[in-house]
Amino acid sequence: MWSLMCVKVLGSGRPVLRGLCRACVAGKLAAGAGQSHPSITQRSRCLSQQPPWRVLFFGSDDFAVESLKLLHASRGERAVVDLLEVVTLSSSVPVRKYAEEHKLRVHDWPDVDFSGQFDVGVVVSFGCLLQERVINRLPYGILNVHPSLLPRWRGPAPVFHTVLHGDKFTGVTIMQIRPKRFDVGPILSQEFYPVPEKITAEELGASLAIVGAQLLVDTLRNLPERIANRREQAKEGATFAPKISSSLSWLIWEEQTCEEIGRLFRAIGSRTPLRTIWMGRAIKLLDFVGECQPFLGPHSAAVPGSVLYQKESNTLLVRCKDCWVGFKSVKLKKRLSAADFYNGSVSLGGCQGADSDESEPREPLGLGQDPHGPSQSRYYLGGGSVTLEHSVRSCSSSP
């Protein structure tokens, strides 16, 4: 029933042993005699030289679902995809849910059945390094949709670091993966994407998922040509985007500017609230509103960590390195509005409440030494550099 042939893969030159059924061989011979070509079912057992492709998709999260959706939608007229099967790491990820809803065959990693004789693999936010033996089972290798302009932001969190570092533009890269290291393979195509001002990492990721899905399908339309013209990544400009750690959420008021705090909030705020120390306890700062301009009068020289309550906007203001930043709510054991939190300090510190007409730094709100000198004591959020560093070390494992 089966014959064997050795196929030289485009671009790589590595030989791959493939099985050909007699029906397919007969169809090839028949074509030269004026008979009809073999059907898609027959051809699915041969190495494809053009679309539609037999695709094995590796993915997990919502970012990956966008690529899977478009691949699934590309199976109709003028199809780019013939066969589409899915590999996931667990039963609860969005990719598996989509695959099951649309009756796509699902493989549980690492138990992958390669009997479908796939042409190419696609990996998007899979979270697992694929071994060389897996890559070599696919004649055109495995393509990766990566949400950055490689070699900038290699690693698992490129979107977060794009926002955190204030990049003005980013993009999507389609590359061929290589074994043993993430994000170092040759580039098949890239598309630039300007980063909108004030965008969050969550919003940027959603936009790049759509851009990446379309770029993937465009690459698959001309896959042999893209592979033939692939280029290695530049050695210059490579940066790493490690996973976001909750330790990044601790604010150091005397070191961080308003711009830096805003970028940090937009990068991680949807997953990890910003945090500081108040009266020896960790406090989460929610609903960041950016830079605020209070009327300070004689208190214009307030030290970083000082706190104001702005009655007109119901906003808690905190002095950072270069200005005041605002938060609409905070969380200790429960979520509190700015007014409730500020009035709550009355019973603890004996200050007047938020109904007061005054707008000035209030005491005590946290514990720290005033940087202006040991003879002047001031209480404020986070504390001075010595107290804050001690607090971060002692509380860095807090949720």
Image: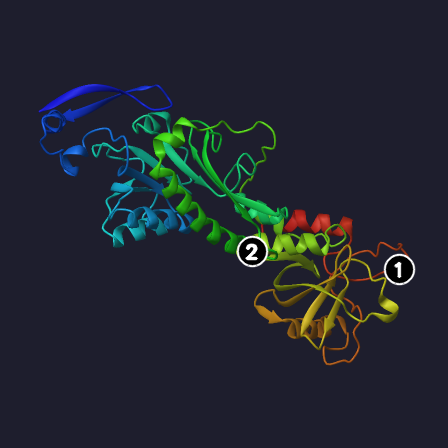
Residue 244 visible in the current orientation: no
- Which residue, as the protein is rendered here, is positioned at the far front? 34
Look at the numbered disc 1 and give the secondary structure of its residue.
loop
Graded by Cα atoms within 10 Å as few (under 14), some (14 to 19) or many (20 or more), the crowding at tag 1 reads: few
Residue designated by label 2: 200
- Which residue, as the protein is rendered here, is positioned at the far right? 375
Quarter-of-image position of residue 285: bottom right
Residue 105 visible in the current orientation: yes
Measure the alpha-carbon separation of dots 2 and 1. Answer: 40 Å
Of residues 229 and 137, which is closer to you in this image? 229
Looking at marks 2 and 1 on the same chain, the residue that comes earlier in the sequence is marked by: 2
Which amino acid does the dot numbered 1 rest on?
Gln
Horizontal and vertical percent position of residue 15 = 30, 18
Quadrant into which the N terminus falls: top left
Colouring chosen for the image of the structure:
rainbow
Residue 376 is tagged as 1
Horizontal and vertical percent position of residue 28 = 14, 26
Q: Residue at x 63, y 48 (%)?
A: 166
Look at the numbered disc 2 and give the secondary structure of its residue.
loop
Quarter-of-image position of residue 139: top left
Quadrant into which the C terminus falls: bottom right
Residue 200, placed above or below residue 172: below
Marks counted in the figure total 2
Q: Residue at x 29, y 27 (%)?
A: 137
Residue 349 is tagged as none
Q: Residue at x 26, y 51 (%)?
A: 100
Which amino acid does the dot numbered 2 rest on?
Thr
